[in-house]
Amino acid sequence: MNKLNYEGKIFKTNNYGDVVVTKYVDSSKVHIRFIETGYEATAEINQIKKGNVKDRLVATVRGVGVLGDEPACVNGKHLKEYLLWQAMLKRCYDPEYCSKHPTYNDCCVSENFKYYPYFKSWCFEQIGFKQTGWELDKDILVRGNKVYSEDTCVFIPQEINKLFNRQNKNQTEYPTGVHYDKREGKFHSHLSVSGGRIRLGRFNSVDAAFQAYKQAKEDQIKVVANKWKEQIDERAYKALMSYRVESLIDSNSIAPTTKVIER
């Protein structure tokens, strides 16, 4: 078949609908356009005939992520930005992952971030992206945030991210940083620091123990924030310096208790 026989001809693909040949290049290559999305590419004629061409504007990652024309791998190795992007989509749209990590229930990704080329470009503009061990965070800039987007995400060192891990994940009756000693009949307050614990004291009430933890935790956050002040995004620094550990009364507990609201 020659140029006249190819241009304008429609072919079916295995998974991406129909494509139309828009321009004949030579006996092995042509330009094509996917009819459904308008995505254009150059393809080999033999692959078109087999239906093996791919529409890179179709959401193929977790059902929502669009790869576009940006490569996910170089020399057989996945790029850092792709791994971040793929992991972000997994946290939000993988049912099995969300069932094991319920804190990600109801989390989602902005339309811009669903498009890999946009996410990649955004990453390269961010402070800390090229630093080893820094992590993508969605909670520091906007408290309680559930949406990954360019307005809510920032890169931070692991040391900062670990500040917001709950200290007693399996404990529900008492707030973070507080436990009850039945033998003494006292409430103990403690702060996690570098994998260890600092005891803050023994108290007669949950609230008193929690207030000791609250003050120590907020002071700890400020110390770490100032340590990284010259390296992290200014928005992250301001958010850390104004961070407050909040509490509420848990009506489902045996007795009124204070509960920490943290990331």
Image: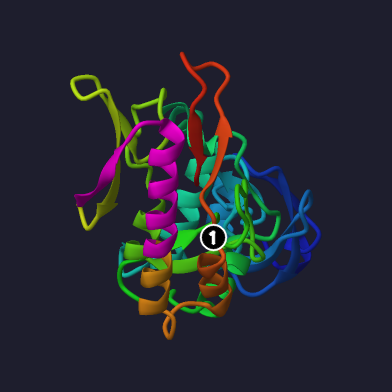
Q: Is residue 51 left or right of residue 1?
A: left
Mark count: 1
Q: Position of residue 93 (x, y in %)?
A: 55, 38
Tell which of 28 and 152 is nearer to you: 152
Tell which of 157 and 107 is nearer to you: 157
- In the figure, 162 relative to 26: above or below? above
Asked whether residue 41 is drawn in magenta, I would say no
- In the figure, 37 relative to 96: above or below? below
Range covered by the magenta-colored residues: 196-220
For image coordinates 76% across by 53% down, the residue present is: 37
Q: Position of residue 54 (x, y in %)?
A: 58, 52
Tell which of 30 and 33 is nearer to you: 33
Which quadrant does the N terminus fall into?
Answer: bottom right
* SS at badge 1: loop
Q: Write down the quadrant of residue 177 in the picture.
A: top left
| Residue type, label 1 | Tyr
How would you classify the magenta stretch by its main secondary structure? helix
